[in-house]
Amino acid sequence: MATLNTVRDRIRTQLEAASGLIEPQVLTSSDATLTTLRDRVESRLQDASNEKWSTDDLDEAILTALEQYSKYNPDHKLTTITLSAAGREIDVSSLTDVLQIEKVWWDYDSSDPSYPPNFRQFEVWPGDVLYVDDRDAPAVDDVVRIWYTAMHTLEDLDSATSTTIPADDEGTIVTGACHFAVHTRVVELSEKVPAHDDVLEELRRFADEMGRN
């Protein structure tokens, strides 16, 4: 017998198919670290000895590029939460670097997953609260499976222990980091009297080209 939730799920599937939405493709994660990526940025900027850009400046540029990249191509994650209390308001503060919660499957049983998935209507409230907007309310020890997007990480950057960016997109982060590093250099040089306008303009053109790329 059809239920409200199964009808919702079928409608969702049809709408996604009609609009061309698909699940994100799983790609091989890069094995790059902060050191290897920084070396590539230094090579691109022709500054292997850090005479023009300090490692701190380059690390900040890499971080900024990673943040901007994550807004357009975030890391897709999947996790489960076992509820310690009953109620519609679920604490999701254990999820780190969350950009958006995409789907909620409740009640979930890993040993016997239902089909189709029992996706629920939900809202995300301030204070890391996930509100289940459904006819039923979760009970103690229920398991909630959550699909969400998060910021990408680069090993050794901001104490990250792994790299999540796709291997094919390493060059994108390098190019973005060059863009932000050169813009920082332009600001620095523009405050110095000996700086020539043509030098600054050339740097701006290079930074803009990296930004477009």
Image: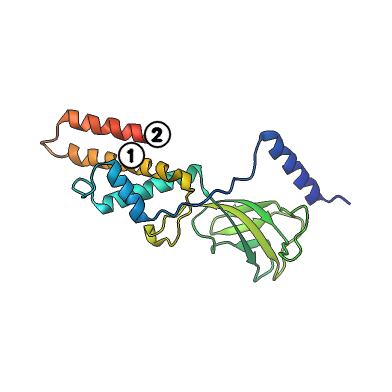
Q: In the image, residue 7 lies at what x, y percent?
A: 80, 46
Residue 15 lies, with reference to residue 126, above or below; the image says above
Residue 179, labelled with which disc?
A: 1
Residue 114: which disc? Answer: none
Question: Are the two marked residues, 2 and 1, in contact with CB atoms closer than 8 angstroms?
Answer: yes
Q: Earlier in the sequence, mark 2 or mark 1?
A: 1
> Relative to 28, does residue 95 appear above or below in the rendering?
below
Please state if 198 lies on the left or on the right of 88 as rendered. left
* Residue 207, horizontal then vertical, whole percent: 31, 35
Q: Residue at x 18, y 39 (%)?
A: 189
* Residue under numbered circle 2: 213
* Element type at mark 1: helix
Front residue of this view, candidates 131 and 73: 73
Q: Secondary structure at mark 2?
A: loop
Q: Nearer the viewer, residue 144 or 34?
A: 34
The colour scheme used here is rainbow
Query: Which residue is at a point 35% across and 48% down the rendered structure image?
Result: 62
